[in-house]
Image (tube, grey):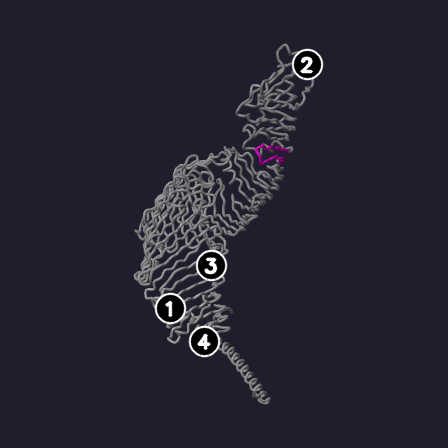
Amino acid sequence: MYSMRPELKRVLKIAALIVLLCLVLLLSFGYLQYRELRKTLAVKISDKATSFLGQEVEVQDVSFSPSAGINLYNIKIKNPEGFTPGDLLNIKRIFLGMNYTRLASGVFSFDDITVHEPALTVQRDKEGRMNISEKLKDFFKRKSTINYDIKAFHIRSGSIDFNQNRSLKSADLNIHLKDLSSEAGHKTLIQGDTVYADDNKIAVNGWAYLKDDSKKFSIVISSKDPGLSPLKEYFDRYGLTAEKMKVTVRVSAEGDTAQGIRLASDIGMKEAGFAFFKKEGKDILLTMRAFLNLRENSLTVEDVSLNAGGSTAATMKGDIKKVQEDFVYTAWLNIRRLDLSAFNFMQNAQVKGILTSDNVRIRGSLKNPLADLSGVVQLRDGGFKSNTEDIDGVSAQVKLSPEKGMTIGADITAKIVKAYGYLLSKPADAVLSLTAHGSPENIALVASAKLSAIGIHLKGDKKMSLNNVALAIDGSVRDKTMEMKNRIDISGITYDTYEVPWIRSSSVVTYQGNVITLRKQDIEGKYFKVAAEQVTVRLPAKNRAEKVTIEIKDLNASYPQKKTELKKASLSLRMGTGPQISGDAGFSVAEGAIYGIRIGFIKGSGRFDNSTFSLSVPEAAIANGNAELSVKGKASGGPFPLTIVAKARDIDIGNLSGEILKITGMPYAVSGNCKSFIFEGTLDSQESVQGNADVQADKIAVIRTDKKNIVQAASLNGGITFRGSDLEFNANAAVGKIATRISGTVKRFLHQDRSAEAKITQPQVMVTDLREIFWDIFPDSLLYAGLDGSLSTDVLIQYGSGEIKVNGDLNLKDVSLRGENGEYAIGTVNGLIPIVYSKPAVPPASGLSPGQNDSSEKKEMQLPSFAQAEFDNLSRTYSGEFAGEGFRKITIGSVSYGFRFLDDIRVWMKQDGSILNIGSFNGSIFGGRLNGAATVDLSEGLHYRAGIHLEGLSLT
């Protein structure tokens, strides 16, 4: 056998190695070129797509092979310029399973196209622009000229996010389209599902001839028991409880773009969660059947039915047509039987009644906001009941008519059983009538209401009643301005013991924007009248932290029966509307009167908040003088403690006393000048005062009703100290040369069981000075008689439990009286005259039981016997000094009447209640002795008994 030479073997080995190395190098170079080609292709695809779509497109990698198809990896479409960095679309992978056999004939044929995990993120900025370029929008509008045939198209695990809104987010989007083609006659099957708003699955099934001219299709969208918690914030606005609601939705559309589309929907809700549905009426079924006619641009609603609680409550049908540049609609609404008791219109309230209607026709257009309505809506067996109100027997009829633009007429009757928490003594009949017609820009309104006699039992066994109430309104609404003339008449008003025969009120109310104006506001009754030229209320503008302001101008009020009136008064009030209430007020009065007391210009202001309030009147003209007032108190749980500072200067007392005289029935009038009055104190409660009051007055005159002066030119300085429920007072009064001191206390002065004690001290004063001061009321026979001597008094006055007691002494010193012509003379008189007076409390009307004693029973006037047989005993008794306990001694020098009648007279007296006991009197008479005793009853006029014993009388 031939053997190869070693040299040749070596050459072959080297050659084979070189070929192998070359092959390796060639394959390595080819692989590197393939990788470079993939990168280049990915870049070229990205650049081409960016230019085509108008937004930056990035394709990270591309792979392709005859068996594995084409794969594009990590495709991103960036946000356009002007938006924050991010992606409009991010796709993990696109698989193109291409059929190359038809590529030569110009048809892109795919056995499968699958898009893996596409994430579409749509954003909208503050200016309303979206992160989609105009070129991309044009791409979707552009009609494709590419011939294609796709056996299957899939989207797997996709997602859609709009502005990061959780309620609009869709995840796990899966779509399967079968038989997509650019040629007509292909029926594309559609199937898909997605998860909407976190946990709500929506399914889509159907088919479509996408490339046929008529584009026939059928599509069904359904969702069963979706969770609606992501929509809670929207449902809360309408009182829906989303967490418990179970919803079934089925919407279908079938037809073609040539003839039209038949639409159907069924929406069922269980445990609907509507706040205005009661528990037993929460199942709702809403069905709709309609046909959309694309040729005629019209929509025919064949039937809309609302089933609530197992029965059909309302149905509707109608149509919408395009007329020129507007859409005109006509609808017929039929309310078969809507039971209002199934609804919760208000918390803690019950509403009942059956609402029905005939076929109410609704006609209008989208450009005209006011539709033409015609038909009748009725309510029967209606009622409203809450903790504070009870209205029954409500019947209502509302008539709708297109006359005069639009006319609505309503007639309502009802029986009011309970109002504002008060039960009426018997149900009151209420009748309401309303008519409105016109357009939204110009509405005329006429309304009237009547209420029959009502009676209400109030707290504390008090009663209130009204004979009847009538209200009339006539107004209009023009250009967002409402103007109403209103009048209300109320007759036969009674409250407790008060009666008002009638009250009438009228005004013109204008409401524009946030301003309410009342012009010519008049309120009049039989005994009073109040009128204001204008009342303006300004409400805060929407979404603005402003205050409510109220202004009243030219307010005039009168109460002739009480001689009270106000003229040209004004008031301004500003008040915050937040949780922390605060505000301020200002007021003024040009002139007026209170109980006939004239007042001049008054001006003041006030402030208040959640905790306190204050009132300041720095200037007030009253009774020809001036006054000031400052008040501070609590607004929450108040008004106590209430701090008051009141001052008055140069007040004309005569201006005050005239009316006080008429009110109190006092037989005296007072005039003078109150130079100063000051009160500074705190009202702790209605029954407790702490503080001081001081008064200074001069030129005081007390005048009887017969015009005679009791006191003239008097002055008074005094003060009061308030100590809770008690007070102490003291005063110094002076008239000419007479000065009087008054002091005392009042216990529980703000209570009905008050008691008082006053001490009056009159120092020694000449009798002639008294005559001079009290000249007008001094007895005429003594005006020019001779008077000498002086007197003084100490009197204690006590009041309590309805009883008055007066105790004191009148001290006479060297008092003498002589007739004008010397025809008589008495004096001198010295001693103490007791002053005792008592007025017992009025006994109760029920009288006394037989076993009781009447404490006010009159005491018997008792005297010793003055029979002749007792003369010897009387002589011995009267010859000694009288020793009666508690008796006061008075001595009289002599009594003469043309001649000396009595000399050296001595009298012992003591007062016991209304009985004045003269225990003994004696004196010398014509050389003999006059002795005796007497009793005087002062309770009713002057009744007396006297006994006289004469001894040793000589008439020679």
- Marked residue nearer the N-terminal end (2 or 3): 3
User: What residue is at 43 percent from the left and 74 percent from the top?
Assistant: 52
Seen in the picture, residue 56 relative to 526 is either above or below; the reply is below
Q: Which residue is mark 2?
A: 876
Q: What distance separates the C-alpha of mark 1 from that of mark 4?
A: 25 Å
Kind of residue indicated by mark 1: Ser
Category of crowding for the residue at label 2, using alpha-carbon neighbours closer than 10 angstroms: few (below 14), some (14–19), many (at least 20): few
Does 905 sit left or right of 622 as displayed? right
Query: Marks 2 and 3: which is nearer the front?
Result: 3
> Of helix, strand and loop, which one carries label 1?
strand
Q: What distance separates the C-alpha of mark 1 from that of mark 3?
A: 30 Å
Query: Marks 1 and 3: which is nearer the front?
Result: 1
Seen in the picture, residue 827 relative to 225 is either above or below; the reply is above
Q: Which residue is mark 1?
A: 181
Q: What distance separates the C-alpha of mark 2 from that of mark 1?
A: 161 Å
User: What residue is at 38 percent from the left and 68 percent from the top?
Assistant: 181
Kind of residue indicated by mark 3: Tyr
Q: Which residues are magenta?
A: 739-762
Q: Which residue is mark 3?
A: 196
- Marked residue nearer the N-terminal end (2 or 1): 1
- Marked residue nearer the N-terminal end (4 or 3): 4
Residue 16 x %, y %: 56, 85
Seen in the picture, residue 248 relative to 393 is either above or below; the reply is below
Farthest residue toward the front?
A: 1
Q: Which residue is mark 4?
A: 48
> Of helix, strand and loop, which one carries label 3?
strand
In this rendered view, identify the residue nearer to me: 782 or 288.
Answer: 288
Q: What distance separates the C-alpha of mark 4 from that of mark 2?
A: 159 Å
> Of helix, strand and loop, which one carries label 4?
helix
Query: Marks 2 and 1: which is nearer the front?
Result: 1
Residue 34 x %, y %: 50, 78
